[in-house]
Amino acid sequence: MTLAVGIACAVSPAVAVAGAPATNFDADNHSQNVYFAGTDGSLREIAWVPGPGWGPLSTVVPAGSLGAGPGTNVDPENHSQNVYFPGSDGSLREISWTPSARWNRVSVIAPAGTLHSAPATNFDPENHSQNVYFAGADGSLQEQAWVSGAGWGAVSVVAPGGSLGSSPATNFDPDNHSQNVYFAGPDQSLREISWTPSAGWDHVSVVAPAGSLGSAPATNYDADNKSQNVYFEGPDGSLREIAWTATSGWSHIYVILPAGSLGSAPGTNFDPENHSQNVYFSGPDGSLREISWTPSGHWDAMSVVTSPGLLVAPAAAPPPPSPAGTGSVALTPTRPKRERTLATKIVMKWHWNHRRTRLLWVKVGPAPRHAAFSISCRGRGCPPHKLQATSATLHRRHRTLSGKVYRAGDRLLVTLRAPHWRPERARITIRNGRQPSVELL
């Protein structure tokens, strides 16, 4: 898909090539290992060990190899770190590291077109299995598992089409003997489904309400606190957490870092030697950043691990902006390969003056019957009500939505829906003295 903001430029698709990191703890090496897709589609790694600290950044798989961010687990029975990722063709691929053999070759686990998100993976010691979860083409939650001795099983559907609004995250909880999978629903609620050997899969449950998540979640299991901990980006770019224990159930949502801190979804691990939960993410400048929690020290200060531009390409420095101007934003997705997914061009005309930006008009391209367009807003300058328009007037410049004034920092969620179609969404950020920025979701 392409995005035009005054001029046309290429952007990442819904499955981002660069962005969210994945991380594991390797007890054999006493190391925290962080993997991410470089902006060139390479697989990159940086590792931390007590004493020496952070090692050098290394390239594990060359440019053009990854179609999305990776997932990783540690298999203590094979003494291996295992990294899974989509190839550029949507196949499921794996590369593994052991102390004796180092990195093996990339292997193809599932064929082209299988993955439609970054994968998530856990190691289940009770079943001696590595389990990989991902979104299917229809938004279903799918799984493929590897068992020592038996090898790879078939891909299975865990939750039906239309269930996922993000990549999944997973952990293994040894106290409950459960594999737990978290993901954003289509309404950006936090949802969970769990598997145990005795009961199999339970039903999908809603953990946090609609609009809670601004990214895919990440999760770890903390053996000291016997807790499942889920981290995610809030709609305002803050880092947030919600935690579950068997005795207390779900906590309320905590804000760990303030608005604007995250440039990607987070990744997390639990380090039993340091008794720490460690959360990694891209900063807005594309640097790798970390924040850690321990029972004794609680949250430490955020630290910057790498230089900027490695996880997310930093935007080119714009010319000094005129404090006022007029321009349009166009969302132009490519026609999807699968049916029943909206791919409609939406043009929004804006006028900005210092911190205030006015919506002049909206025009929506050809859309199915009974389509509905809406704009919801989060921020201090937002109108009191969601703006909506129906199919009767969508195809002309829709001025019933116009005249609304927003303030710098407001975040708009633009949605086009139609019955029996998957919705089309974009996030628009109002900026100071500049044309609004747009991210296709």
Image (tube, rainbow, N blue to C red):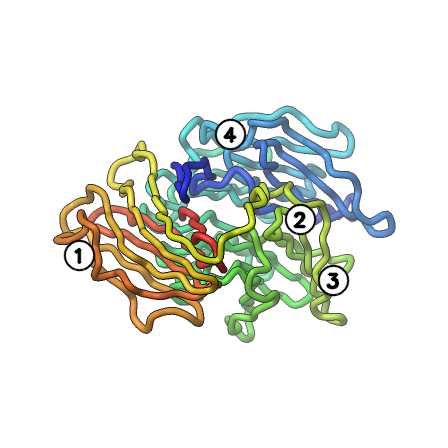
Q: Give how far across and how far down residue 397 sits, in percent.
A: 21, 51
Q: Nearer the viewer, residue 16 or 101?
A: 16
Q: Residue 17, percent across and down? A: 52, 37
The disc label shown at residue 390, or none: 1
Q: Is residue 348 left or right of residue 81?
A: left
Q: According to the image, label 4 marks what residue?
A: 87
Which mark's residue is nearer the viewer, 3 or 2? 2
SS label for mark 4: loop
- Answer whether residue 21 is visible to the viewer in this image: yes
The amino acid type of the residue labelled 4 equals Gly
Residue kind at label 2, given as amino acid type: Leu
Q: Secondary structure at mark 3?
A: loop
Distance between mark 1 and mark 3 Cα atoms = 54 Å
Q: Which mark is residue 288?
A: 2
Figure quadrant of the N terminus: top left
**Residue 435, position in %: x, y?**
44, 52
- What residue lies at 48% left-to-right and 49% top-to-bottom? 168
- Name the residue tied to disc 3: 275
Q: Report the residue at 51% width, 55% height from top.
A: 217
